[in-house]
Structures are given as structure tokens and as C-alpha cells.
Image (cartoon, helix red, strand yellow):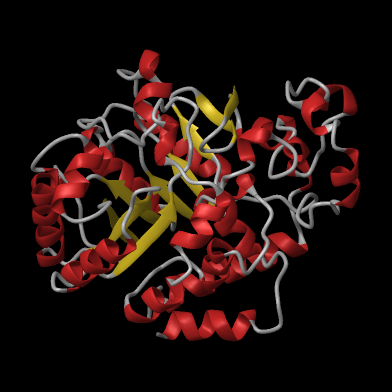
């Protein structure tokens, strides 16, 4: 199975409970005067016909998180071309959250899965204690890393079915090292994957697709990783940070449709862990709205609003993020910064929530899980 049956059952139960009884304090919508503070308000009021055709968001009154993005620090040993974190948080690059802050945020959010990211989380001094603390709370962990320190740091972790190391690889050696702006990174990441698999850990690869990405090369990458016994592959189109100067590396929606037109063939051949509904969205065969609250981000500045990519505010509490963010002002057709975005942190939750579902989705999902 691509995802353990116990995890599927836990997530399904969590979603069902929250759909039936969503926490009322998270469903508040901003007053009109608060929404008017959005600097892009004048942009989307210039297209009244488009706004008139849009239906109310099907989850607007049933908001709840699915995956918490936890960034204990933003320091990193790499300067990847497409990464906005080290640029956006340049002023706080030396800061980090305390272990207590991290675990309190996990409790406050309550999402069943935590994605530990950054920066490079293996640089966090208390990373072993953080992982153990999250696992002790019954959460699932996706640990996002460039893999360079993985072999060295493995002694701080114990294999657990709820823990997955998600190693960043954007192509074969030459192109991956070019993307991360340092030679030798690919080899170190591969050594980290080998060590993790030998140690009994579950490992995914994490690939970002850019405008210049050759999908045939990604196919060869997955074939190569197959020999190492890798457990799954996460893949998503690159997302445009305003902090990244080289905007030509990012894609329009039409570019994404072209890149991912054969994703079904890849999914049948390799254990891709993106849901079939999200992959239909990437091909242009399915419309999904953005549900950014499904993957909220917490870092040294607080709860990042509205999403992993756009920073219009930081909030002290998760409830403030949920109740003070003008969700209705974001997404395609509302905010120009959202027009080309198709990234997983905005749209995978929509697929999980069952938005714009079809009668065949259950069969597709079951077949995908069992393949």
C-alpha cells in the first residue's frame, strides 16, 4: 500500500468528525471592514462578472487543518534557487523555536500530521526530542530534509511507522546539484537514503518540478531510487515566492498541465503519494479551490497567514490565524498572487476534503492506495 491502512483510517475518521462537527471558533468570517484592508481588494472588484459567477466556497464554514507545517528554524546549509525561505526570513535566519513552543503549537493546531520542514530541520539542536514529542502525541510526521546530514543524525531517531523521511531530490545528480547550487549534494542525499533504509526507516523522495524540468529525467530518477528500496515519491509543481528573484523558473497553470499530462503513467509505474484527485488537478482534468487553512504553517514569527507561500501576517495563536485571515480574499480569481499556484499545500487538502468530488473518486482512491 502507498499509505499504511492505519494512517488512512485515522485521517478518514478525523476528517469525518470535523466535517460533522467543525469547531465553531475556527469558522468565523471577518467583518466587511476587515476584509476591506486587503490591498488587492480593488483588483478583484474590477471583475464583478467573475466574482458573480463564483459560488461560495464549499468548506468556508467547515475549516479545519489536516497537516501542520512546522518550521523550527529557517537556517539552512544550502541556498536552493527556488527556495524563498532563506530569503524571506533573512532577518530571522539565526532564530529558532524552543522545543516547548513547537510542541505547544502541535497541540494547539491538532492536525493529525505534522510536516517538519524549514530551513534544514536536521540543524535543529533538539530535533530528536521534537520528533519523539510529536510521535508521543499520536501524530504522523513527514520529515522534510535535503538529506545531507541524514546518515550522521540517524542515531537521534528510532524507526516508527508514523515517521517518514522526505528527502529533497529535484533530478539526477547534475541537475539536482545545479538546483541546490552546490556540487556533491546529490551523492550525500543518496548516502542518507541508503543509511535510513538500512536502519529500518521509511523514506520518500520529494521532487519539485520547474519550468525547465525534464519529466523523463524524473522518471529515470524514480527508477534509480527504486533500486534503493525507497517507499514513495512526493511530486509537486514549483511555486513562485515573491522573495525569489528568478521568476522564470516557475510555471503558469498551462505549463503545469503540459508537464503533468502523463502523470497517470508515472503513478502506475511508481509509488507516487500524491492523491489521484490532486493529480487530476495537475493535469487540468479537475477544478479544485485552494484550502490553505488545511496546511497551516508555524515558524519563528508565529502562525503564517494566509499560507505557506504568501505572508500577509503572522499570528500569535492558531485561532487568530483561523479567525483573522480573510480567507475569502485569496485563491484564483481573488488575489493575483494566487493565479498560477497549484502547489500541494493549497490543493491536496481540497482533494482530501472531498471538494468537487465525483462518484468514481472512492474507487480511484481505493485502487491507488492498494496499488
58 lies above or below 156: below
Side (left or right) of 360 relative to 98: right
Percent position (x, y) of residue 340? 58, 44
260 lies above or below 314: below
Residue 89 sits in quarter: top left
The C terminus appears in which quarter of the rendering? bottom left
Residue at image position (18%, 72%) is 229
Number of numbered discs present? 0
Percent position (x, y) of residue 144? 32, 48
Percent position (x, y) of residue 160? 28, 63
Residue at image position (70%, 32%) is 325
Residue at image position (38%, 54%) is 141
Side (left or right) of 160 relative to 141: left
Q: Nearer the viewer, residue 78 or 142?
A: 78
Residue at image position (39%, 30%) is 246
Residue 62 sits in quarter: bottom right
Percent position (x, y) of residue 11? 54, 66
Q: Is residue 328 visible?
A: yes
Side (left or right) of 371 relative to 28: left
Q: Is residue 162 visible?
A: no
The N terminus appears in which quarter of the rendering? bottom left
Q: Nearer the viewer, residue 100 or 36?
A: 36
15 lies above or below 368: above
Amino acid at each position: 500500500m502507498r499509505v499504511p491502512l492505519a494512517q488512512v483510517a485515522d485521517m478518514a475518521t478525523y476528517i469525518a468528525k470535523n466535517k460533522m462537527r467543525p469547531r465553531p471558533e475556527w469558522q468565523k468570517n471577518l467583518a466587511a471592514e476587515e476584509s476591506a484592508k486587503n490591498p488587492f481588494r480593488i483588483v478583484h472588484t474590477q471583475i464583478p462578472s467573475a466574482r458573480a459567477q463564483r459560488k461560495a466556497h464549499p468548506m468556508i464554514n467547515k475549516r479545519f487543518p489536516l497537516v501542520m507545517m512546522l518550521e523550527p528554524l529557517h537556517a539552512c546549509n544550502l541556498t536552493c534557487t527556488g527556495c524563498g525561505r532563506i530569503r524571506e526570513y533573512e532577518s530571522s535566519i539565526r532564530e529558532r523555536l524552543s522545543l516547548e513552543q513547537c510542541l505547544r503549537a502541535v497541540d494547539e493546531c491538532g492536525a493529525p500530521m505534522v510536516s517538519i520542514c524549514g530551513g534544514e530541520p536536521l540543524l535543529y539542536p533538539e530535533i530528536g526530542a521534537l520528533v519523539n514529542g510529536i510521535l508521543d502525541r499520536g501524530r504522523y510526521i513527514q520529515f522534510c530534509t535535503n538529506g545531507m546530514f541524514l546518515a550522521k543524525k540517524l542515531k537521534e531517531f528510532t524507526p516508527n511507522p508514523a515517521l517518514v523521511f522526505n528527502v529533497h531530490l529535484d533530478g539526477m545528480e547534475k541537475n539536482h546539484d545545479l538546483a541546490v547550487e552546490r556540487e556533491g549534494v546529490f551523492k550525500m542525499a543518496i548516502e542518507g537514503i541508503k543509511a535510513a533504509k538500512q536502519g529500518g526507516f521509511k523514506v520518500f523522495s520529494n521532487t519539485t518540478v520547474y519550468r525547465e524540468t525534464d519529466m523523463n529525467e524524473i522518471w529515470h530518477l524514480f527508477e534509480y531510487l527504486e533500486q534503493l528500496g525507497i517507499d514513495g515519491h512526493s511530486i509537486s509543481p514549483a511555486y513562485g515566492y515573491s522573495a525569489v528573484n528568478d521568476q522564470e523558473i516557475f510555471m503558469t497553470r498551462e505549463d503545469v498541465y503540459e508537464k503533468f499530462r502523463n502523470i497517470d503513467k508515472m503513478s502506475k509505474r511508481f509509488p507516487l503519494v500524491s492523491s489521484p484527485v490532486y493529480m487530476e488537478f495537475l493535469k487540468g482534468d479537475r477544478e479544485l479551490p485552494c484550502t490553505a487553512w488545511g496546511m497551516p504553517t508555524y515558524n519563528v514569527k508565529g502562525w503564517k497567514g494566509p499560507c505557506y507561500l504568501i505572508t500577509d501576517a503572522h499570528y500569535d495563536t492558531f485561532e487568530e490565524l483561523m479567525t483573522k485571515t480573510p480567507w475569502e480574499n485569496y485563491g484564483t480569481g481573488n488575489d493575483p498572487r494566487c493565479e498560477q499556484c497549484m502547489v500541494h499545500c493549497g490543493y491536496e487538502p481540497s482533494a482530501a476534503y472531498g471538494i468537487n468530488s465525483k462518484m468514481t473518486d472512492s474507487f480511484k482512491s481505493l485502487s491507488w492506495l492498494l496499488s
